[in-house]
């Protein structure tokens, strides 16, 4: 049984943070319907309990290379394999799954050469792994930045977007070294204030704000809200592996992005044309989703599917068996 239930106030706050993860509480308060002090207090509780957090990772604007890797390992080695892979900085996320693979890991490396070293050198050296199948990422069509809890009305969403505009891509960026330091500051606290950032970087607040705006707007650094999935209204996570005719991949990918359950859509250079990850309210909803795919996208063939049993690492953060962030 769940040991926590997000109430509607929590879900409204978290939906607002999905839209603008770093927005000041004063900008979110009118849409959420609570004062800034109350929002800050509730966020502090959710964060301290590992129920919600702002994750930070390197975006495609930094020219990273990425892949999805299916892993099969000996049952007795699952724990040791998990610990070794979770400790690797190139492993962004890791899911234990039921189905045709024991794990699905998301690998993000600094460049193609680094990705190759991980796949060809580091991964085979992990004792207990029986086999792997790698699907190099071609296009990331959608990720969880566009997935929503659906707790705010459209007019409330627009109010947040107006009160807290997106960072400007025209902002002057920082040096590579400074941006690297900025990344680790945000990795520690995705909502660190400009004052905190400027003090840690040893630069003025305007310069810190410009560096942050440029890195976010140009997708070199990504910050996004995450929640403990298994305790949320969407506790079921499923990976789908799809085959689509080459002439239809782009069109199908665009249609998949619009589905409310979908959190990840990526085209790959592996066995499958497209891989998607979805969050559902119930396991039975898999049948409904698959029927919708069959009716709306008859050219899509579902080659395989895997239900996530546990997520030891998600977007660079270690999670406990309940899905809470380990502080």
Image (cartoon, rainbow, N blue to C red):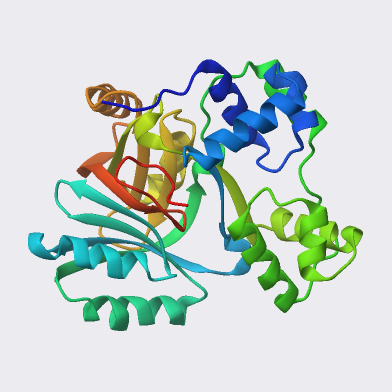
Position of residue 204 in the picture relative to residue 231 (left or right): right
Q: Quadrant of residue 98?
A: top left
Image vertical order of residue 261 relative to residue 243, above or below: above
Q: Is residue 74 visible?
A: no
Quarter of the image where the N terminus is located: top left
Residue pictured at 70% horizontal, 65% vertical: 182
Q: Nearer the viewer, residue 2 or 24?
A: 2
State the image coordinates of residue 307 (x, y, percent, origin top left).
Answer: 23, 40
State the image coordinates of residue 264 (x, y, percent, origin top left).
Answer: 43, 44
Q: Quadrant of residue 136?
A: bottom left
Q: Nearer the viewer, residue 13 or 97?
A: 13
State the image coordinates of residue 25 (x, y, percent, origin top left).
Answer: 75, 32
Position of residue 68 in the picture relative to residue 72 (left or right): right
Q: Is residue 128 visible?
A: yes
Residue pictured at 54% horizontal, 23% vertical: 11
Residue pictured at 78% horizontal, 48% vertical: 167
**Number of numbered tags placed on the structure image:** 0
Q: Nearer the viewer, residue 132 or 273?
A: 132
Residue pictured at 85% horizontal, 64% vertical: 172
Image vertical order of residue 216 relative to residue 323, above or below: below
State the image coordinates of residue 100 (x, y, percent, origin top left).
Answer: 14, 51
């Amino acid at each position: 049984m769940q040991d926590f239930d997000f109430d509607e106030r929590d879900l409204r706050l978290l939906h607002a943070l999905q839209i603008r993860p770093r927005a000041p509480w004063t900008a979110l308060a009118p849409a959420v319907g609570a004062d800034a002090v109350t929002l800050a207090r509730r966020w502090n509780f959710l964060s301290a309990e590992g129920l919600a957090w702002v994750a930070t990772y390197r975006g495609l604007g930094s020219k990273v290379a990425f892949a999805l890797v299916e892993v099969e390992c000996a049952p007795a080695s699952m724990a040791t394999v998990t610990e070794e892979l979770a400790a690797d900085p190139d492993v962004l996320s890791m899911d234990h799954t039921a189905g045709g693979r024991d794990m699905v890991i998301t690998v993000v490396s600094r460049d193609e050469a680094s990705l190759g070293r991980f796949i060809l050198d580091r991964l085979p050296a992990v004792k207990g792994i029986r086999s792997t199948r790698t699907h190099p990422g071609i296009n990331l069509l959608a990720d969880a930045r566009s997935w929503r809890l659906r707790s705010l009305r459209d007019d409330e969403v627009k109010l947040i977007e107006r009160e807290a505009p997106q960072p400007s891509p025209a902002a002057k960026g920082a040096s590579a070294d400074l941006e690297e330091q900025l990344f680790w500051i945000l990795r520690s606290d995705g909502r660190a204030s400009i004052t905190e950032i400027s003090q840690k970087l040893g630069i003025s607040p305007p310069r810190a704000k410009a560096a942050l705006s440029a890195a976010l707007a140009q997708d070199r650094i990504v910050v996004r809200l995450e929640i403990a999935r298994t305790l949320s209204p969407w506790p079921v996570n499923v990976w789908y592996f799809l085959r689509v005719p080459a002439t239809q991949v782009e069109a199908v990918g665009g249609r998949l992005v619009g589905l409310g359950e979908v959190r990840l859509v990526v085209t790959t250079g592996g066995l499958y044309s497209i891989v998607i990850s979805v969050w559902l309210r119930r396991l039975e909803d898999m049948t409904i989703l698959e029927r919708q795919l069959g009716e709306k996208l008859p050219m899509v063939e579902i080659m395989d599917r895997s239900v996530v049993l546990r997520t030891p690492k998600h977007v660079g953060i270690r999670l406990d068996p309940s899905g809470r962030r380990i502080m």
